[in-house]
Image (tube, grey):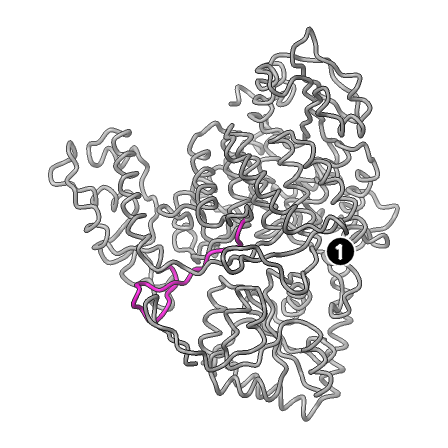
Amino acid sequence: MTMATGGKNSEPSVPRYTNRLINEKSPYLLQHAHNPVDWYPWGQEAFDKAEKENKLIFLSVGYSTCHWCHVMEEESFKNKEIGEIMNKNFVCIKVDREERPDVDKVYMTFVQATSGGGGWPMSVWLTPDLKPFAGGTYFPPDDRVYRVGFRTVLLRIAEQWKQNKDTLLESSQKIMEALLIQAEIRGQAQESPPPSEEVMGTCFQQLSKSYDEECGGFSEFPKFPTPVNLNFLFTYWALHRTTPEGARALQMALHTLKMMACGGIHDHIGQGFHRYSTDQHWHVPHFEKMLYDQGQLAAAYTKAFQISGDEFFADVAGDILLYVSRDLSDQAGGFYSAEDADSYPTATSGEKREGAFCVWTAEEIRALLPDPVEGATEGTTLGDVFMHHYGVKEDGNVSPMKDPHKELKGKNVLIVKSSLELTAARFGLELGRLSALLRESRQRLSAARAQRPQPHLDTKMLASWNGLMISGFALAGATLAKEEYVSRAVQAASFLQRHLFNPTSGRLLRSCYRGKDNTVEQSAVPIQGFLEDYVFVIQALFDLYEASLDQGWLEWALQLQHMQDKLFWDPKGFAYFSSEAGDPSLLFRLKDDQDGAEPSANSVTVTNLLRAACYSGHMEWVEKAGRILAAFSERLLKIPVALPEMARASAAFHHTLKQVVICGDPQGEDTKDLLRCVHSVFCPNKVLMLADGDGAAFLRRQLPFLSSLERRDGKATAYLCSNFACSLPVTSPQELRTMLAPHASGAP
């Protein structure tokens, strides 16, 4: 490669190589446009070449903020000699998994089934008709003690294709047949959903067993935030408030959120959360920041505040939303996908390092915070107080075990090691004073950090992740009574309508991109939305309606739900396929069966369908929700911990959603008091609707029973309805609170 490797200030020379990826919009594909590998994007041109030349395909799948993807590129894809081997023997295809989750899932199913593990970069070898026969994840360039090198694998596979082509084709056919059987999730027409109480109970026990009592979270390490687990525990608590199990569920969720917020996985200077922690203590993270984590965690910290009344959680939610508004927001209103883990330590550095943007030496901190602290023990500086509170050590606080590449030697990842009370006592300071000193210190570090070279930003905008983020802003806006958060959610939903929706066809698009001059661009052949795009956007629109009470969002959500049914529903086996029919390059259509870093689309859609039925009166949506639960019945009864979001939804199905109807003038203080009350109570199995005179035209058309509800004595009035039959009216927030959370004891 003749691309300059210097930092910001060096002049890049003309690239020696340029391949077809130069014409793509995805930041990940563009990162590989100057490799000596003759990369093709996923598409007919590459497939035709493989078929015509009877060549195997090498498929490499990753994403732009993936640390090990960068490593494999540096070691192998930028290596001229390895590039020559690849070009001579294979048609090489690059896929951004965030653009094409359908392609990623098909081949990841294969890699997991054949190697027992999975991850990115994913490396798969396919026959010319796209069937996989060999695969793995990261390969070092050359043979190592325990790992075969990429060069060796390439040469061996090329040789096998020459010598044993028929055997390879036969084995790929067998693998395909086995995968098809394994991937099939289907229900029977007569089957009923599994009993919710049993599913919830088993899921709680399984989470409880894997729970880390000391540090929170549900594994030793690596530790992912996994908000689906926390949402499940909140719902479990709400349904079992008065039992010891309910109390434990809440304690597990709140302790986990507290430990994460104190840990190094939380960026104490730049806000937001990193993707996961490499250790048990949430200390040393992989430093990339993903939009889907910010959206889900903003919602989880908001719910934690709603339940506990502890301002700590509200502050963390605000901190996440500040980060997203400042660093992941496009001026047109959309949200960017991610921020990279790797960056140049200084403007003149030749090599990027993981975490360089976020870590500190003790010396740097002392130099930035030299001021003596008045009133503290003799000789104390601001640096002393800050370093004590955030666990900073003179020779760095990262264990060599967690730093295989020695990138963090002598550096500190900030982690709150001590409570405010203990730090205050240690230095003889009042709590308020200490908080102000720490705030001032963080601001100084933030200003210093802004001078460092920024990590790469993936400015791709995805419908699904934008949906998750809109939900985060809408829930926080409603619960914390912050109008600016609701406005930001509205701005993003309007962005989706403008740039990721085709009003003529009624369909969503998957992605759009920040182009030149900050315009929003679309690829030459736009990628159509997948199931997850519909599901997370529909969820966002319901959340946004409850926060803004603008019925336009409700109307759009119901339109999208009809379209989702049309494109993805499986009438034979029930539940929804992840991708639509009719793409010949996809070997099979899958149904996700795991709630992981993001919830699976079928899990979230169960609740969406129940909400849609409540707002529309279309009871076939309730039936569909039951069919999905029945299709996943075996998994929900045996290992519901793999589907905590679906387990949670099974409770909503069995308990029937409550319709909270407020009749009143949206501008009236009495109406606002009742709405504030609804937003302040954690009540997972409810939908909110405002039935005010004219503005409710759409809802009144959908739900004739609303016409019989009226204000009592001219005051704003609330009704709690179930299956379209309603309770007696109440006009005071206290009475409404009791109806929403009958077992709550003075909850906030």
* x and y, in percent, of residue 37 in the image: 54, 81
Q: Which residues are magenta?
A: 335-355
Q: Is residue 520 magenta?
A: no
Residue 278 appears in the figure: no
Residue at image position (51%, 50%) is 330
* x and y, in percent, of residue 611 in the image: 72, 35
State the count of labels: 1
Vertical side of 327 occupied by 547: above or below = above
Residue at image position (59%, 48%) is 466
Quadrant (top left, top right, bottom left, bottom right) of the N terminus:
bottom left
Residue at image position (19%, 51%) is 367
| Label 1: which secondary element | loop
* Amino acid marked by disc 1: Phe
Work out whether residue 33 or residue 569 is closer to the camera in this orientation and state it: 33
Q: Quadrant of residue 395?
A: bottom left
Work out whether residue 29 or residue 722 is closer to the camera in this orientation and state it: 29
